[in-house]
Image (spheres, rainbow, N blue to C red):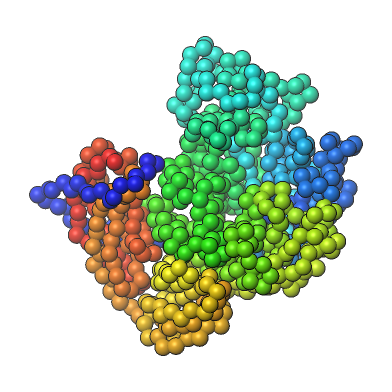
Amino acid sequence: MRLFASATLAISALVMPHAPPPPGGDALAALAQPPARTALATQRIYFVMTDRYRNGDAGNDRGGLTGARGVTGYDPTDVGWFHGGDFKGLTGDCTGKTTGLARIKDLGFTAIWVTPPFAQKAVQGDSAAYHGYWGLDFTTVDPHLGTDADFAAFVDCAHSLGLKVILDVVVNHTADVIIPGGGSSYSDAPYRDCRGRVFKPAQYVAQPFPCLRASSMPRPPVVFEPERALKKPAWLNDVTKYHNRGDVDFSSCSPQCLEQGDFFGLDDVFTEQPAVVGGWAEAYGAWIRRYKVDGFRIDTAKHVNAAFFRLWVPKILAIARAAGVPDFQVFGEVFDTNALNLVPFVRDRGLPNLLDFPLQDAAASFAAGESPVRALVTRLDDDDYFRLPDGIAPTPATFLGNHDMGRAAALIRDRSGASGAVLLQRDLLAHDLLYLLRGAPVVYYGDEVGMMGTGGDKAARQDLFPTQVAEWRGESRVGSGPIGTGSSFDALDHPVAAHLRELGALRDEYPALSTGSTIVRLSTRSVLAVSRIDAAARREYVAVFNSGTSPVTVTVATATGPTTWTALLGSPIVEGSLTLTVPALSSVLLRADSQIPLRPPPKPALKVAGDDLSDLWRLSAQAAGTPVSVAFAVLRKGKRWQRLGVDDSPPYRVFLDPRRFAKNEPVHLVAIARSLDGRVELSKVMPFTVRRR
């Protein structure tokens, strides 16, 4: 997507003597339908590194291997090695609420996301594959984590408790087995087929792929004899199924290098090849068929070629439907805090959903008191770039910290300088944002007992069971003291855990907090107020967040009008229609005691302009007053009215991509406002010429 720093561009309208009639009847009703939410929107996800949760079977600690840690990968005293956690430990007895899955359910979660369970290359360099991202055999469970039967029992227990199971999967790379000939630095030499002819892989993603010879790859691959048949499925042992370009250099890498280079030396799979697309679909589809898992989180999605997910995701969803998992969810990891950089992965590349790194950055900064609320409001507004004709509202997986960047409390601590009770307040405030704003909250294991750590990666992957890592025993925790030689499972009443239960119960009781539209009511440097609208029940909820160190009194405009309000979270002082005082470093949630009055929708005023941040055309509509949804539709010559997108959170906008139209194609546009009771109003039909930008 091309970015612009210039001001908004004016439209070019095509004046036609006879405007077509606006949509009507059943067609209008279909176009005007409000946004739908995916099954992901209602989930609260516990993200756990299986090796670090709990050791349920000491017999598998070394993965069936013998010898020193350089062979077995096991050293529970070192942060970079296997520590003994496994699926038996994670499952527990499926009833006790102190350790296993029943504990996770009791914390208020509805889903569990586990690091890749697949068999690994146990040791690479000076570390082990405890994290699961060095896969060798994608057909079975890594023996350090247990057996296939243990995994099946884990999934069965989760499902019996009402927990969804999300697997972390990797399509970008496998473990490091291939040695790049001629050196490991990245080579941008062109690909040549078996006859020596230069070709571009992107031109063959949906047709027969050119034959390849290992000797003509940019870095001719070398594999030592003992490792030539290690990988499963067997096609992964074919060295021509890898890009073989050498390592990504993150300081000077081109877009091609980011997609085709080896990520930290790991074997980068040649995902442009149709055989690879089908191979990965079958390999991971087998886990859906066999275990009925409920979703995938896609690791390193940023580093996969642009066409892969458009081809692979439909295969995965078809396998899931056939296996009896109709609401299978897929979300990808694109580590970028600029929302505009994420847009192509949904609009163009075919990823259904993403982890919300931009919201993570904005929420952590706001909760830390580091930045004003504007970044949060901007991120919510940027949802409009992700609105597509299918009418699915953007509901990404949201989070505060993770296994790569570090834990939520540590990030807030480092940004704010806070400690003690103040840091705890800021941490709880951050979790309020996570649960009361749109999206599917993801909480990283251990955050619920105050784990902080000293940084990201290995420094943020502590043991929940009694740790043998000396430095972890003395690490500070938010809301409690260091764990010492004790077990984190004994922290039954930790304030963060208690707060997560409270927030989870609120989302269970009031569905609008998961699936309702969002209206930003107020934003100052330290205060954000939003309404969440339950359209079906015509009920309004107002959440107010104060990251300042003093109480604030605010007056919030609402759609409900004069009514009384019930406090569901926090202890606000409420006066009049909705004037309230919010304590320092805290949040409140209120529910209107009356329904939103039924009103006809306003006639929307449609505007079209060139977007100043992208190469898209921005369609917007003014529709002040009662909560509405606004759909935008286009009429092309010889076709019917088609929806471009629908928005139920002001500002009402969708974006038209000129690449989807002929150059200078004449079309007509209309905006359709729909009230809570289904009444509609249309804008004037606008003629428009779709110019490239």
Percent position of residue 17, x then y: 9, 49
Percent position of residue 142, x then y: 76, 42
Give the answer, above or below, for where 156 lies relative to 373: above
Q: Is residue 37 visible?
A: no
Outermost residue to the top: 195
Q: What's the residue at 74%, 29% (across, down)?
A: 230
- Side of 264 where 94 appears, left or right: right
Outermost residue to the front: 417
Outermost residue to the left: 17
Total numbered circles: 0
Residue nearest the observer in this picture, 245 or 604:
245
Q: What's the residue at 14%, 52% (across, down)?
A: 19
Percent position of residue 677, x then y: 35, 73
- Side of 213 where 15 appears, left or right: left
- Side of 160 where 386 appears, left or right: left
Residue nearest the observer in this picture, 222 or 86:
222
- Side of 546 where 491 appears, left or right: right
Give the answer, above or below, for where 382 lies relative to 80: below
Q: Is residue 302 visible?
A: yes
